[in-house]
Amino acid sequence: MDPIDAELALAEVRIRRDQVVTSTLVPTWFWPTVGALMLLFVAAVESGVPWLIATGSALYGAGLSAVIGVVAFRSRVQVRNALLGPRGALAIAGFALTLVALGLGLAFTLQALGLPHPATIAAVPVALGMTFGGPRLMAYLRRLMLSRPLAGAR
Amino acid sequence: MTGVEPRFDDLIHAPTRLALVSLLTAAEWADFKFLREQTGLSDSALSKQLTTLEDAGYIDIRKSFVGKRPRTSARLTPTGREAFAAHVAALQEIVSRAGLEITP
């Protein structure tokens, strides 16, 4: 076989893997949408007004279900777990834990300082973290998955 | 290299099947529609290629329902994964022997 043809075949394999990886990443709009929903929910709950809590909770539940439903329904392929690997799983867990720690830490600090609406204020940087950090996390995961050996990771 | 014994596989190397197996090797499973969109094959052409791969024991085809909608999906079997790894190793060996640079 011609080595150039072999290299072209390997390039085809790489392109197809890229297609799978790209298809499975969470879309960019997901992050600000979930961040905004979370912010509205926290603000509604912290208001202490019963009808606002009820409305905010209902909107949050419906909105989150719709967003996750759209992402799940679009999903027509599941990327191989081995491509993500422990590093990918750790990156996802680290991202989530960082945001939780940031939100809780800031909220309790603001509460201790006696500021009004500590949870809502603390949710703002968390929402921003999701908006700007989410796409960066996806970019990292994409790079990580595409760096795996072509037919390795059994 | 990955330690896999290189073995050129004519069945996999056919262009459309190479595309399909390459997609499936990166996936736990893939929907029929996804494979059709990515390869640009017609329903009948895709079915034919998937059946060829299934007959060789390289893929499993599963039919299920998502809500009320039927969904057909495919996944690579361990045999198919091994065959693909050996095929890639063979391609890399050919490239390497020619002194070309191999992307891992």
Image (tube, coloured by chain):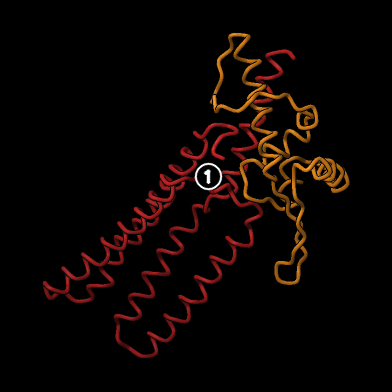
User: How many marks can you see?
Assistant: 1
| Nearer the observer, B53 or A60 | B53
Q: Quadrant of the N terminus of chain B?
A: top right
A119 left or right of A139? left
B8 left or right of B85? right
User: Residue B99: percent from the left, percent from the top?
Assistant: 58, 9
| Nearer the observer, A125 or B96 | B96
Q: Residue at x 33, y 88 (%)?
A: A49
* Outermost bottom residue: A50
- Label 1 sits on residue: A82
Chain given the colour red: A
User: Residue B88: percent from the left, percent from the top?
Assistant: 65, 27
Residue A43, image quadrant: bottom left
A94 left or right of B45? left
* Outermost left residue: A113
**Amino acid identity at mark 1:** Ala
Above or below, B71 against B100 in this view is below
Residue B26, image quadrant: top right
Residue B103, image quadrant: top right
Chain given the colour orange: B
User: Residue A3: percent from the left, percent from the top?
Assistant: 68, 13
| Nearer the observer, B36 or B2 | B2
Give the SS element for disc 1: helix
User: Residue A141: percent from the left, percent from the top?
Assistant: 46, 44
Q: Residue at x 70, y 45 (%)?
A: B77
A35 left or right of A17? left
Above or below, B25 against A89 in this view is above
Q: Residues within 10 Å of mark 1 (few under 14, many from 20)?
A: some
Above or below, B59 against A54 in this view is above
> Badge 1 sits on which subunit?
A
